Amino acid sequence: MRTFLLCSALLLAIAPTGTAAPALGDKPPKWEYAELTFRNLPGRPAGTDADGKEIPATPASVSIRWINPTGEVEAKGWDELADKLKAPALKKGTAAYQKIQILNHLGSEGWELMEQTGGSATALLDGPGPRGPRGPGAFETAPGFRAGSATGTWLLKRRVP
């Protein structure tokens, strides 16, 4: 009996006091969504294919698209995107460093990352044949991509007041 009374007292001590959880607001929170997509393509030097035909050099390029409820913005670099978003001037550095500065700017505006896709590297076969002129060890992927190319898409959201 003594054990029963002790257990009962303990249960009463830790039982809820009758206060309910705070009520949720009348309206659920509203969100707006955005998407940031980028594609990096490294340059390729000029060369010749297996038939001896000239292959022109291809310059490196970056393509970025920011889509949000107010519209779409396209840029050819992170610094150009910063200008178009009216972000503070980016500090000098690599493209990766500039990308981080843009993400920090978007975070300061309330944007939160929800989902990330992409970011894989691929390689281009420069000519005909099962392995192309790179020889054994070259790997095959979709035409138009080459080693070091990368694409990525980020889905972001922020709370609307």
Image: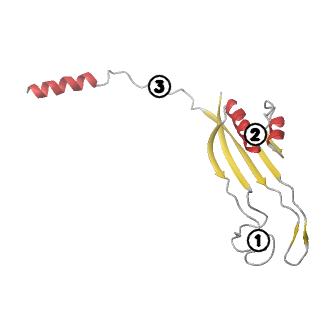
Q: Earlier in the sequence, mark 1 or mark 2?
A: 2
Q: Name the kind of residue labelled 1 in the image.
A: Arg
Answer with the quarter of the image where residue 132 lies: bottom right
Q: CA distance from mark 3 to mark 2?
A: 43 Å
Where on the picture, by quarter, is residue 108?
top right
Q: Earlier in the sequence, mark 3 or mark 2?
A: 3
Residue 134 numbered mark, or none: 1
Q: Secondary structure at mark 1?
A: loop
Residue at 17% from the left image edge and 27% from the top image edge = 7
Of the two numbered discs 3 and 2 in the rendering, the one whose residue sits closer to the viewer: 2
Q: Is 106 on the left-hand or right-hand side of 4?
A: right
Amino acid type for the residue under numbered disc 3: Ala
Residue 104: image x %, image y %? 69, 34
Mark 2 surroundings: few (<14), some (14-19) or many (≥20) residues within 10 A: some
Identify the residue under disc 2: 98
Residue that mark 3 sits on: 23
* Viewer-nearest of discs 3 and 1: 1
Quadrant in the rendering for residue 28: top right
Dot 3 or dot 1: first in sequence order is: 3
Up-down relation of residue 39 to residue 96 (above or below): below
Question: Where is residue 52 shown, x and y percent of the image?
Answer: 90, 76
User: Residues under labels 3 and 1: Cα distance?
Assistant: 66 Å
Q: Pick whichever, 69 or 115, lies toward us.
A: 115
